[in-house]
Image (cartoon, helix red, strand yellow):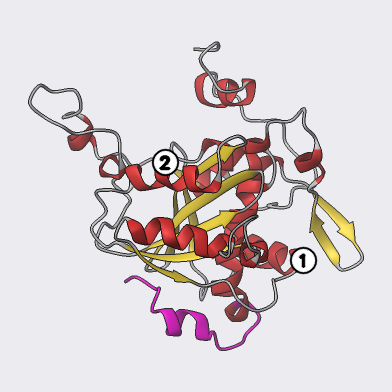
Amino acid sequence: MKDAAPSALIYEAEILNIRPKEITDGFYANLNPEKHYYTDYNNGYLETIGVVGHKESFNSNQDNDVLSNAPLIVSVDFGVFNSCVVSQLQGDKYRVLKSFWVKSPKLLDDLFIEQFLPYYAPHKEKRIYLYGGHDGNNKLPNSSLTLFEQVESVLRAHKWVVATMTRGAAVTHYDKYLLINAMLKRSQPNLPSIHINEHNNPDLIIGLERAEAVEGLAGVQKNKKDERNAKILQQHTTHLPDAFDIPLAAMFNDIFKGSRNKHLNETQIRIS
């Protein structure tokens, strides 16, 4: 199993049950495995996989936490290393359902065509609220499409309805730090609690647990130095946590600051 594991961190965390080395000054300071991680399999479906006469495969049907008749929140971190985090807002719970990533020579299209689309093929409500970094508005080389438009075209070609939600100025790292830690601490009843599917997000979890906070001119910032270190597996740096942050900031920062939030009303993204 050690030889087959994608990294020593994954082997220690999943096989030996050894948590990654703690970060003294974590950006996600209030993240607590006992409070925020869960597993929720659809065991009835899993028992049919491999049975003669059945065509079932490993896809979102194995996840008991997915509301198949509700839209998905998909957030993308763009670059040579492309990643996305899939979530749903279910009442007063924000569930992080699954995460995906590809690295060069795989491209952005591969992330969706090879991973996201096959996994969520059984999903009944083919509607996505698409988020991402503001670099998603940049055009692809030798293309008239932006990165967001490229993702939209791939998804729409497979009959998904897509609403791109990223617009306006990006929320600062310090605002994200305050907001997300308040949500993790569950200190404000008007904000949903965060729940992360542990089995479906091993690399995201490692990235969250290893993300460091540093002091900057504008307050606390996320330390992103490992993204420039070729010796570190990029799936364990801050790429996936960045994708995790974006919808939370867009959907809840106004509420956290005491302002009326038009975002949820306009999109009707809240699921009861």
Q: In this rendering, is residue 124 above or below 253? A: above
Residue picked out by circle 1: 174
Q: Is residue 9 left or right of residue 73?
A: right
Task: Please state which of residues 209 and 59 is positioned toward the viewer in this rendering.
Answer: 59
Q: Is label 1 or label 2 in front?
A: 2
SS at mark 1 in the image: helix
Whether residues under marks 1 and 2 lie with C-beta atoms below 8 angstroms apart, the answer is: no
Relative horizontal placement of residue 151, taking residue 258 as reference (left or right)? left
For disc 2, the neighbor class at 10 Å (few under 14, some 14 to 19, many from 20) is some
Quarter containing the C terminus: bottom left
- Residue 8 in the magenta stretch? The answer is no
Q: Is residue 114 above or below residue 2?
A: below
Tell me the distance, in whole angstroms, between the alpha carbons under discs 1 and 2: 32 Å
Q: Would you identify the image quadrant in which residue 24 lies?
A: top right
The amino acid beneath tag 2 is Gln
Q: Which residues are magenta?
A: 256-272
Q: Residue at x 62, y 57 (%)?
A: 140
